[in-house]
Image (tube, rainbow, N blue to C red):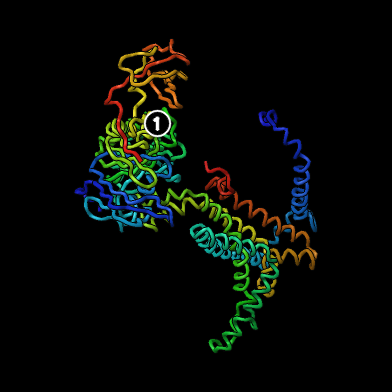
Amino acid sequence: MNALTKHMHPGWLIIAPLLALVTLLYLGPILNILWLSVTDPEPGLGNYAKLGESDALLRIVWTTVRICIITTLFSVTLGYSIAYAMVHCHQRQKSYMLTLLLVSFWISILVRTFSWLMLLGRKGLVNVTLEDIGLIAEPIAFMRNELGVLIGMIHYMIPYAVLPLLVSMQSLDTRVMDASRNLGASGSQTFWRIYLPLTTPGLVASTLLVFILSLGFYVTPAVLGGGKVLMVAEYISVQLLVTLKWGTAAMLAALMLFGVLAMLWVMSRFMKLSTVFGGAAR
Amino acid sequence: MSDSNQVGSLQVRGVSKYFGEFRAVNDINLDIRNGEFLTLLGPSGSGKTTLLMMIAGFLGITKGDIALDGSSITDVPAEKRNFGMVFQGYALFPHMSVRDNIGYALSVRKRPVSEIKNRVDEMLDLVQLNDFADRKPGQLSGGQQQRVALARALCFAPPVLLLDEPLGALDKKLRVEVQEQLKDIHRRVGTTFIYVTHDQEEALSMSDRIVIMRDGAIEQVGTPKELYERPINEFTAGFLGKSNFIRANGKIFALRPEKIDLQLGTGHPDARSSGVVRSVTYFGSMHRVIVDTGGGDEIEVDIDVWRNSESLSAGDSVDLLWNDAAAVELQTG
């Protein structure tokens, strides 16, 4: 530490005000939330104890975790194939695909959520068409349930899953795959023994990103779940705005924060997080 | 597939590779003998790497045929050709230990674990990396990585080993050392080596035969000595070592700088040419003297340092002498 201050780059002085501001604006609110969770309505761990007492709360947490896991699984798997296709197709097609990927970032989550409602709702395009051609008698319940939430969330998350994977695949030395073939490995052997292990950092980064973003999902479950699928974020907002139990809301927020930190910690036991977040591998 | 009766001679028949309109390799015919150390030498863009990649099976052939011991392999995919290859930059598997890298070819062939272990140990001996078996490639020096790549490519006893500028990433001193090791390994394993390089010194010191390529075609094939002593055209003479070109009676001759003798003063009875010294450069083992022979022509002469050319300096008049045999007539046009 001493050595660090001695050799501190003068550039730090220039960015110090910004650094202080960011620290203040990030740490302040977070500490405030943590503080609220143990002081409102009365000091103590009463808010956390509610987790053990209330089945409803536990169910909400479990629903959230389940939906996030399924969303992550599908988004990352589909994202992996999309990224793979993008890396291996011609430059021209690749730039088309990249453009489409970026466009999906520009479209508001509200628009994307309501489009699903129009497509897959009871009176949506798909159900009406299927009824018209006589394939089904009753509309299929795509929406206003967990399936609807999953469809909406996976659709929203796929571009996020693709980007870290794309970076990871593009930085691979293709000669390594050539070497594997040259040594007699079949395509699938090369994939499982060389390609997949070498893209694992990208896979982990993609998984973490999608899972953490999914945890905080609010609009999609609210609209596509039709009130039947209650996730933590929506519950927090109800506690804040309707029932005014800020202590419970803060407790849940803190829980999510600790959950994410715990996940990062577990990951760091298995691999260097710096490789996942784009640091040098060696 | 890798039968022991494969001996490793390659026949390249009229092979061409076009990239659109561009002819990267144009109608190459070449017989590569079993067990020889053959070097494809040429400047970048000469098609030498393209030819190697077609032999390896990574690039398709536009026209022609490649055969191993007489049977065509043109339609055999890269993973079924059983050719070892040392890639430019080595292309080691960064997530595997040295041992797993070397054993990879046997492991994907599902050989028993004990066999793989024994063979890898043999290979580690061959390249003297026994102490590094459990390291990852990232923890090795460039020279050590190069040896891992070599051991990995030789582990499954391929009939032919392809080497794509394997020493390009090493510094000059290390390169000379590794050249010796490579030659030694070639002698011990007896496999056919096909070696791609743009470094003429490397080619001269290591090869049994050299193929000089330019613009996708073969310029000349021969032993290092044949090519150095009897280049057939200006390109070969100029690419392999240094050469003076002397025009006389509509003919053109190549004359190596070290085969010219230089005498101070003019009027020597056997002088073939004379001129004025323009510069003398000290190179440690020799002096390089540039002589202006008039009419804008220059002749380069290398003189051994022991002849003490201290006395020689720019502006001196000198006579130049050489044997008839030293001047090699070249094809023109």
> Where is residue B124, by image quadrant?
top left
User: Which residue lies under the disc numbered 1?
Assistant: B175
Q: Residues within 10 Å of mark 1 (few under 14, many from 20)?
A: some
Residue situated in front as seen by the camera: A34 or A92: A92
Q: Residue at x 52, y 60 (%)?
A: A86
Farthest residue in the top direction?
A: B311
Q: Position of residue A208 (x, y in %)?
A: 59, 55
> Where is residue B283, by image quadrant?
top left
Q: Quadrant of the N terminus of chain B?
A: bottom left
Residue situated in front as seen by the camera: A139 or A15: A15
Q: Quadrant of the C terminus of chain B?
A: top left
Left or right: where does residue A44 sit relative to residue B290? Answer: right
Q: Position of residue A57 (x, y in %)?
A: 68, 65
Q: Helix, strand or loop at disc 1?
A: helix
Left or right: where does residue B98 sit relative to residue A44? Answer: left
Instruction: Please tell me how many numbered marks the rendered image carries.
Output: 1
- Say if B5 sits above or below B267 in the image: below
Q: Position of residue A41 (x, y in %)?
A: 80, 58
Which residue type does callout 1 highlight?
A: Arg
Residue situated in front as seen by the camera: A81 or B253: B253
